[in-house]
């Protein structure tokens, strides 16, 4: 398989690169970076100097970033990943569609079904070229849309917060247990979620020993959560979402407060969750004696989750932990590629979490 | 003023010690530690080796931990601080009461008015000696009970999570804006909040780059929040409280989701908050352009807080950040001592936050 | 291949477990833990709950810790790893030797050729049973003793600090460039190097934002460095070793100041290093424009190293960075197993470093 | 006293601001920032919103950054602090000198006596206006040059690394114990030492769980160490200096390997150190049972130090820990101001270290 990564020098792109270098089905890899075109990998990504993959993949020994040529991408690739800023994947998706190449967009360009939300949350609009793609793009929450992803040609990879929030709340929505009222979500994220561009708020001295909310009640990932929860619940669901940065590099931990449609016990809820994910190798439903923690999934494609009912049985609280660059981005993207190309879902994603 | 600290080698006790060494009204200091009696401070607290206070306070040069002698404490002190495990302050409070000595308990022994809650949440019960003290103990949330604290002889210093949660939600409750329904709170805490006793969960390799919930929906600080919110709101308020550890030493950040009794705007809410705290030097109400962060209060007695209404005006979300060992424990305890002894509220608490 | 790990619940043991679960040549795995015998892996090691290896290795799905039975270990294993406290590997090594089973000791029991050093540095002595094993044990610095390791039945896996120090200084010693005088080494280590047992010095609040030396000039790893440097240099070499803890979980960074036997330039030294390691896939010799950093090797078996001559050409300074639990312990142990069993050196060790 | 801080929005400038706001002798404060002129403090320094100093110093309530007007600075100040980029303090120092105003430069513009070193290490040269000032500037290592500082009008505040290195090695040099040969120094620094400007190398995700050397053997602070060691030793001393970043905000820890002129014991060395610093309130000489750690001095003006002789008595190893923004910069600057203005050395610097 020939694969191209557009935006390979950012954190999601670099994570994809590392995963694809080790992926047994990948025979050719094009790493596109506008900023670093022509430079060797090691100049930007010191960990990828001299990857051991060179033994199996001699071409991996001398990897350089390339400039973006949509034609070259189209003619040289069977699968394209876009890890690009908001809006930039649109023309690439159109070109890939026309060339019959499968594309996974790690950005948000095709996640929302309602085209009017893009200008509001992402400051761009779809035009007549890309608007039709919204209806064929599949939301790439692998465990929930496997069948559609398998036949998809354009996959909209979910955001990191929505992946955690949705995996830990959709079972309840599908069971008809999600009542009226707002779902309140606090999402904690490691700082790699903010990307590789330095800024004062992410400067080590100001972020270490610090914790802070940002973009509260208006984060871009909110409509994505509302869209999927509403669809599965069968009624409109509003989400009050509060993202917060915590002083670590990787990891998402979401806490969701959900109104119950009827009284339920923790045991009943856990049973629904276990059944939902019994055939999902990356989802680990924790029982009553455990709670998720981000370090237990660090560097892996796992999502650990659990749920509890409050004492009065009127509310549920659900938690999920994942690695924002794996299951929250590049890992799920490769999982979707596997599904699209008929490979076992776990291919190239077997990495055990790094502990401690 | 002669002061004794019972439990001076723990984190709250050490913080008290540091504050009292620098407090201009303190002339004599007894540091009680069962574990380290007889040992010099520096053997346990390397930062307190040779404190500069020695210039003004020659006795500070040669401080040692002392064994606990209730009689000595009673005869040698004008004010006693208890930074002791749950239940241990009871006899000391009784002895102090009888000796006419003012006491501030940094533990929970006298925080709850309803005596039946102690066995459930703290595994001890009050007996006929200490039960009567519950009715004279004043809940030491300084900004809300100044007048009562000024005349109190027994102050129950609030917990770190309740201090942050209550300071950022009570203004709304008092204004009659807190509606029916559960208040959902996510509290993030630095690891010093778990105390100085090492354990696997707080072992550096397992806590760094990790974030995790614990004691969810049954944390001991829950009844304290419910008691105060219910009292100020004038109707029963249930709190769903989810504490989480984040990888930093100091700092509490709480996020509270509150049902509104009637529609309100952020501007209206902020105006209520500003008015509430206009004469409170330690409370900094942040406007719409800012959000609290723990580093901005690190090492100080400040509590930074703010509030927002959701777009539909039906819910409010409030945040507060404080240093769990200062405003969340020792700092507020000294603030209460100042009030009890007629000193300016800020005496000995002027420290500017440490940044970055 | 059937493999046993003695001491599987500590950090080195857990790292071995993770590597061996994913190792293609391992068909059977026995995880021995005195403390946790009978318990499932997930109770102690939350990241190893439900490992994906289960697909390829169905037995991995239901792993439990076992009690230590030397006989069982001998009869059930082709290769044994000891990740045990000082002295504890001795009887196991004797039993394995007699049973004809290959053993890799991750501890120090067989690292030192001079038997008199054990009582001094490790508080145990070899007896007539295990003394003879000292002469057949091979020091498992893979890149330097490949041929011997391939035929060895007992391998003494090097310490984490010595691995970094030796890999970055032996090329110079072998080239006859190491002059008279002490070699001074500062070794920085992440806290996982101190093991999984909680203690005040490793308690998160006291270790975060802290850096401190310990066991200076008398650390146990010193004689190991002196033994190997002296042997390769051909004259006695004294090492002044200063270990220091820095606030991170994984990683070793050593800085070595070496007296030169004759004037040399950085280019000359780098050329020697490059030639030394041209066929070593895990050693990355960095040129004049780069310096090692621990994050660039995190979670991998790489050792990044480089060297500089001082301006006057009389001294060299060498740096090495590695992951103390991989190349500094479990990774190198698996590398040695690969060599002992005729497998490609990199089998099961292809993991790309985790960045950022 | 009227004080001006030039460069008040950087980390050293902000630390000075915090210290001066709380300094009892400071009646007027001008905070100069080219970048933030006109803006309120809180827009840049969230911890300094509404400082409590307002009670004692009403003017502190409404502090704004000001534009730089050398005339205004000269006419409005009794003491000026420069926390400016290399070279920028030169004209200010000249203007202050002519106006008869005392100035402390926290940069390097006047630290080196040998004018030829500036172009080499700092890319600027002194001209005829500022060259003469080199001979009247006093190197502000407070404990070593108290008498000169008391009468100085221009103080060159030492760098953070030199302060730690020199305080822990000069006693040995003055005792005639420093032998021939290079002094090798490894200096570990928290990231705030690199300043407040964000860059990839200090971006939280790439710095957390990372440790790395930089500018090895050619760091700007090297000539400063060589100048002072040579002067006190009475013979030329070469320093091989290796700075390294560790993942914390504040703190310097230096390890210095020193050739001894004659054999000496640890006890003998410690006795020399204790005598040297017996009247220095900020220097804590630790005995044989303790080693310095950065957290024990965090947020204070202390420098903790100690020394050991190697087993053969031919080398000494010395360690020092300090807070790079306090004793390593702003704290020592205020200490020097105190000395220059006849105030007690510790005025405004009594802060106890923040622990944990």
Image (tube, coloured by chain):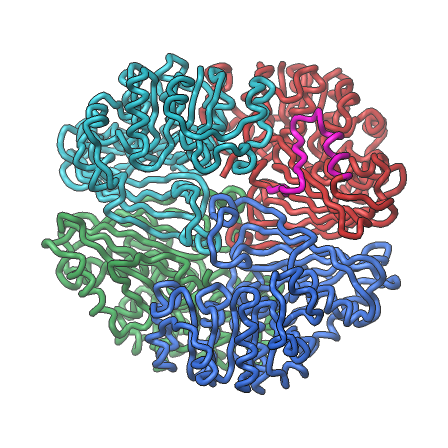
Chain colours: A cyan, B green, C red, D blue
Q: Is residue C89 left or right of residue A296?
A: right
| Residue closest to the far front | D128
Q: Is residue B157 left or right of residue D74?
A: left
| Residue closest to the far left | B262
Q: Quadrant of the N terminus of chain B?
A: bottom left
Image quarter of residue C136: top right
Residue beneath the point at 27% across and 44% down: A219
Image quarter of residue D94: bottom right
Label count reads: 0
The percent position of residue D210, horizontal first and vertical second, equals 56, 45
The percent position of residue D208, horizontal first and vertical second, equals 51, 46
As for residue C193 lying within the magenta part, the answer is no
Image quarter of residue A229: top left
Residue beneath the point at 41% across and 29% down: A68
**Residue segment shown in magenta:** C268-293
The answer to which of C160 and D5 lies nearer the viewer is D5
């Amino acid at each position: 398989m020939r694969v191209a990564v557009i935006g390979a020098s950012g954190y999601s792109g670099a994570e994809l690169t590392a995963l694809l270098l080790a992926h047994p089905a990948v025979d050719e890899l094009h790493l596109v970076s506008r900023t670093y075109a022509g430079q060797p990998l090691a100049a930007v990504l010191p960990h990828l100097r001299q990857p051991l993959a060179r033994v199996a993949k001699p071409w991996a020994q001398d990897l350089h970033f390339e400039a973006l040529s949509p034609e070259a991408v189209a003619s040289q690739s069977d699968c394209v990943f876009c890890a690009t800023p908001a809006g930039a994947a649109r023309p690439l998706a159109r070109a890939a569609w026309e060339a019959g190449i499968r594309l996974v967009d790690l950005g948000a360009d095709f996640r929302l079904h309602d085209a009017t939300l893009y200008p509001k949350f992402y400051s761009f609009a779809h035009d007549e070229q890309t608007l039709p793609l919204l209806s064929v793009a599949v939301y790439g929450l692998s465990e929930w849309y496997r069948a559609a992803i398998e036949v998809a040609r354009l996959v909209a990879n979910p955001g990191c917060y929505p992946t955690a929030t949705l995996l830990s709340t959709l079972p309840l929505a599908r069971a008809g247990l999600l009542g009226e009222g707002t779902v309140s979500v606090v999402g904690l994220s490691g700082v790699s979620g903010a990307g590789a561009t330095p800024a004062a708020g992410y400067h080590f001295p100001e972020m270490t020993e610090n914790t802070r909310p940002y973009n509260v009640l208006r984060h871009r990932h909110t409509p994505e959560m509302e869209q999927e929860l509403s669809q599965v619940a069968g009624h409109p669901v509003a989400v009050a979402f509060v993202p917060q940065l915590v002083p670590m590099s990787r990891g998402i931990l979401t806490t969701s407060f959900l109104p119950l449609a009827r009284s339920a016990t923790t045991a009943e809820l856990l049973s629904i969750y276990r059944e939902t994910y019994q055939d999902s190798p990356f989802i680990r439903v924790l029982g009553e004696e455990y709670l998720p923690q981000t370090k237990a999934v660090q560097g892996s494609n796992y999502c650990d989750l659990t749920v509890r009912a409050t004492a009065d049985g009127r509310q549920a609280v659900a938690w999920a932990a994942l690695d924002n660059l794996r299951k929250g981005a590049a890992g799920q993207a490769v999982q979707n590629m596997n599904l699209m190309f008929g490979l076992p879902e776990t291919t190239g994603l077997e990495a055990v979490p790094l502990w401690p």
